[in-house]
């Protein structure tokens, strides 16, 4: 019973969906306020979602209907799955095991691949260009993201998210060593979420909506929800790895602190996308490999040295 | 498709990047543009023909509706041509008021462009900020003329409305505020890294190409073409005002941005001079209803470049012929040159950088059959073509036409 509860209600599908829609509201509101607009009311994402559920669904004639319809569900399922491994209100997550850091990273990669396949099979030219771009982008930001996250894990000498939080709980100020990695991963997360300046795969003034061009109705609602879930999961993942403190005050305060950390990261992401213009795909690849990857490696090197000098 | 890496994607006639219907067929190889096919003609409204059926006075207001942004440009250009034929001496105060509205229009048009450019490179914050600031100008225009876009300030022989001291104060207040903001945008445009990355080196139009393709306005001036009708063929009050013609040698979209934002500062200075030196006197002279036979050709520096009107009068109250060439028609040819071997991602901003106004440009409709060469159709042929087209699909207008004809007979 308790397993079903945690999968379906908390922290599973229901909680994460509501949290994701609320995160979308926050993101849009902050974005709007920074742009001197009023922004949407709090129920706007919920209303959009319900509206999309009721809309007619059109599958392109040449599209592979099975793949076209399966991909949104695939993407949604894997991003929700990743949330089950987050340490929400205590240092242990629900189903901790050694190696869940890697599993979460891969579960977060699956939606991007699903977008690629869904866009590719919808046979529209805009979708195809968008799909290829999102894959190209994946190859650029995935490496710094992985190295950034793993260098934090290297310092803690574990592949388990729970062990990682325990380690940083014992060594109180060690998370300050990971600030470079945090910055790198924040930028990579922006790219993963396909937000400005990295919204190249769905650049609306060039290729309409990229991979999502042909989607409508329920499946489009699912895709949008997936992106929102990714926003929450990505932010909580960064919060768990790079801001691993505040679990010692019991479950309720711990959960509140965790939420605050997630909100802080969402705020950072919103500010970042307010102040810049969209890059071109070649500039994006260039930027990732020329700046983010070396920075991530510096972080890794730093952590190896710290591990050798201070920990042992 | 022979080569799977080569394909053609349609940008338009309906597309989020375009604010007006327009078709660009882009041949792509990967992300690179290998060929571009531009088609105009989705928004033909038959304005030139409509002008012939209306009086000169009505035409002033009809031609103002060619463009929703540079409406004053078209009406002034037409009015100046007609005044030349009729030999009217327009009072100086009227000329100054025309200049004032013209410069305010330039400011609002350039602000609009800055926002659109921001949106095309995915920088929506710039769009929101500039369009917010643009409201100040729109309010001032509404205060001076009664309307936000189609001002209707011109009439044959002068202007329709006078301005008073309180309005002058309001204008100066708005100008002061906007000048501060403009300086801030110049700072943003010259310092923000992602903007520079996206704009510089994009859409290059060399000086020679700009001359060869006849680029006008900021598009030409950003390629070092030192031409401005306001100075070269001064109309209205420009001969008595001091201003610089901004040119730039970047030859790219970045240069066009710089030219536009610097022109804003010039416009503010012109507006200040106009308000300071505003002469006293009447604001209009009486124009005859029937314009004597003759023809005139008038040039006008619209925010987008040189606007050209040709008017032929035959001694009645209706013009014999009105010909309009909007600045976009002169600039659209250079787009193909600018996009040679560029990335698809550059396309929206390069198109936007000429500040296109496609609906203003459409002067002619040409029918493109699937297999045949394209042909130009006369009015009668077009009419019978449409009647045929509809009757083939079971829609018959003959009854309706008869009724309409009868109705007009009674009158």
Image (tube, rainbow, N blue to C red):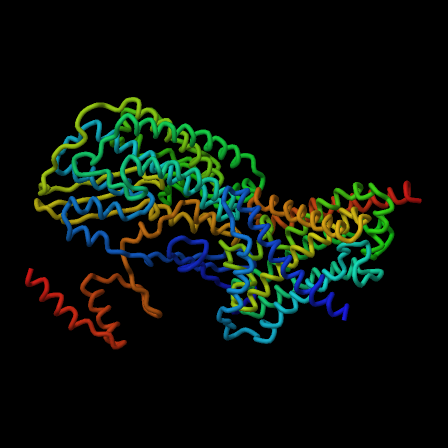
Residue A65 or A254: which is nearer the viewer? A254
Question: How many discs appear?
Answer: 0
Query: Which quadrant would the C terminus of chain B be assigned to in this image?
Result: bottom left
Relative vertical location of residue A119 with respect to residue A62 in this rendering, above or below = above
User: Looking at the picture, how far across and down is residue A305, in whole percent?
Assistant: 87, 42
- The residue at the point 87 percent across, 46 percent down is A170
Q: On the picture, is B111 further left or further right than A236?
A: left
- The residue at the point 14 percent across, 49 percent down is B320
Q: Residue furthest left?
A: B410
User: Looking at the picture, how far across and down is residue B199, in whole percent?
Assistant: 52, 42
User: Looking at the picture, how far across and down is residue B204, in whole percent?
Assistant: 48, 44
Residue A148 visible from this viewpoint = no
User: Looking at the picture, how far across and down is residue A108, in whole percent?
Assistant: 70, 60
Q: Residue furthest right?
A: A312
Relative vertical location of residue B87 with respect to residue A28 in this rendering, above or below = above
Q: On the picture, is A21 further left or further right than B181?
A: right
Q: On the picture, is B91 further left or further right than A120?
A: left
Relative vertical location of residue A61 with respect to residue B78 in this rendering, above or below = below
Residue B245 or A50: which is nearer the viewer? A50
Residue A239 visible from this viewpoint = yes
User: Quadrant location of residue B168?
Assistant: top left
- The residue at the point 20 percent across, 65 percent down is B383
- The residue at the point 82 percent across, 48 percent down is A248
């Amino acid at each position: 019973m308790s397993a079903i509860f945690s999968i379906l209600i908390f922290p599973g599908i229901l909680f994460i969906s509501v949290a994701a829609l609320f995160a979308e509201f926050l993101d849009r509101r902050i974005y709007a306020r920074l742009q001197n607009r009023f922004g949407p009311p709090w129920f706007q994402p919920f209303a959009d979602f319900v509206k999309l559920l009721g809309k007619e669904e059109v599958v392109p004639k040449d599209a592979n209907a099975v793949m076209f319809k399966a991909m949104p569900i695939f993407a949604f399922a894997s991003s929700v799955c990743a949330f089950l491994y987050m340490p929400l209100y205590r240092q242990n997550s629900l189903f901790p095991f050694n190696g869940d850091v890697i599993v979460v990273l891969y579960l977060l990669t699956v939606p991007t691949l699903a977008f690629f396949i869904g866009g590719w099979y919808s046979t529209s030219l805009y979708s195809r260009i968008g799909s290829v771009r999102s894959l190209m982008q994946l190859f650029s930001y995935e490496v710094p993201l992985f190295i950034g996250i793993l260098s934090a894990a290297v310092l803690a000498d574990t592949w388990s998210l729970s062990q990682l939080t325990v380690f940083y709980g014992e060594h109180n100020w060690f998370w300050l060593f990971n600030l470079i990695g945090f910055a790198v991963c924040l930028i990579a997360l922006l790219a993963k979420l396909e937000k400005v300046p990295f919204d190249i795969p769905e650049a609306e003034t060039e290729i309409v909506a990229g991979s999502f061009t042909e989607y409508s109705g329920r499946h489009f609602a699912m895709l949008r929800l997936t992106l929102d879930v990714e926003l929450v999961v990505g932010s909580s993942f960064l919060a768990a790895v790079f801001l691993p403190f505040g679990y010692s005050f019991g479950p309720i305060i711990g959960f509140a602190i965790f939420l605050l950390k997630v909100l802080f990261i969402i705020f950072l992401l919103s500010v970042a996308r307010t102040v810049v213009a969209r890059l071109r795909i070649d500039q994006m690849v260039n930027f990732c490999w020329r700046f983010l990857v070396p920075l991530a490696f510096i972080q890794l090197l730093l952590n190896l040295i710290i591990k050798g000098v201070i920990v042992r | 498709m022979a080569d799977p890496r080569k394909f053609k994607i349609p940008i338009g006639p309906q597309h989020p990047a375009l604010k007006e219907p327009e078709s660009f067929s882009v041949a792509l190889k990967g992300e690179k543009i290998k060929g571009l096919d531009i088609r105009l003609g989705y928004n033909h409204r038959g304005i030139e023909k409509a002008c012939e059926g209306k009086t000169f006075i009505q035409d002033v207001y009809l031609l103002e509706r060619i463009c929703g942004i540079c409406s004053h440009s078209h009406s002034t250009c037409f009015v100046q041509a007609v005044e030349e034929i009729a030999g009217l001496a327009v009072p100086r105060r009227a000329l100054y008021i025309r200049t004032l509205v013209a410069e305010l229009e330039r400011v609002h048009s350039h602000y609009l462009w800055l926002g659109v450019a921001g949106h095309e490179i995915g920088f929506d914050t710039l769009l929101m900020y500039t369009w917010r600031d643009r409201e100040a100008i729109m309010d001032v225009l509404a205060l001076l003329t009664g309307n936000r876009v189609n001002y209707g300030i011109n009439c044959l022989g002068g202007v329709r409305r006078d301005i008073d001291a309180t309005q002058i104060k309001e204008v100066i207040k708005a100008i002061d505020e906007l000048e501060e903001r403009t300086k801030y945008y110049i700072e943003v445009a010259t310092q923000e890294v992602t903007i520079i990355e996206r704009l510089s080196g994009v859409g290059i139009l060399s000086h020679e190409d700009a001359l060869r393709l006849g680029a006008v306005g900021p598009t030409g001036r950003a390629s070092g073409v030192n031409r401005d009708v306001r100075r070269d063929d001064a109309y209205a009050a420009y001969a008595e005002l001091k201003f610089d013609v901004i040119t730039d040698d970047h030859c790219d979209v970045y240069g066009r941005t710089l030219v536009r934002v610097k022109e804003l500062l010039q416009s503010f200075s012109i507006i200040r001079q106009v308000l300071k030196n505003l002469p006293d006197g009447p604001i209009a002279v009486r124009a005859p209803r029937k314009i004597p036979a003759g023809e005139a050709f008038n040039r006008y520096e619209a925010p987008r470049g040189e606007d050209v009107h040709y008017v032929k009068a035959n001694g009645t109250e209706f013009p014999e012929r009105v010909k309009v060439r909007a600045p976009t028609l002169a600039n659209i040819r250079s787009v193909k040159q600018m996009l040679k071997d560029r990335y698809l991602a550059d396309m929206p901003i390069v198109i936007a950088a000429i500040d296109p106004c496609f609906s203003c440009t459409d002067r002619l409709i040409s029918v493109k059959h699937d297999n045949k060469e394209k042909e130009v159709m006369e009015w009668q042929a077009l009419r019978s073509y449409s009647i045929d087209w509809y009757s083939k699909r079971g829609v018959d207008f003959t009854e309706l036409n008869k009724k309409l004809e009868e109705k007009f007979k009674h009158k």
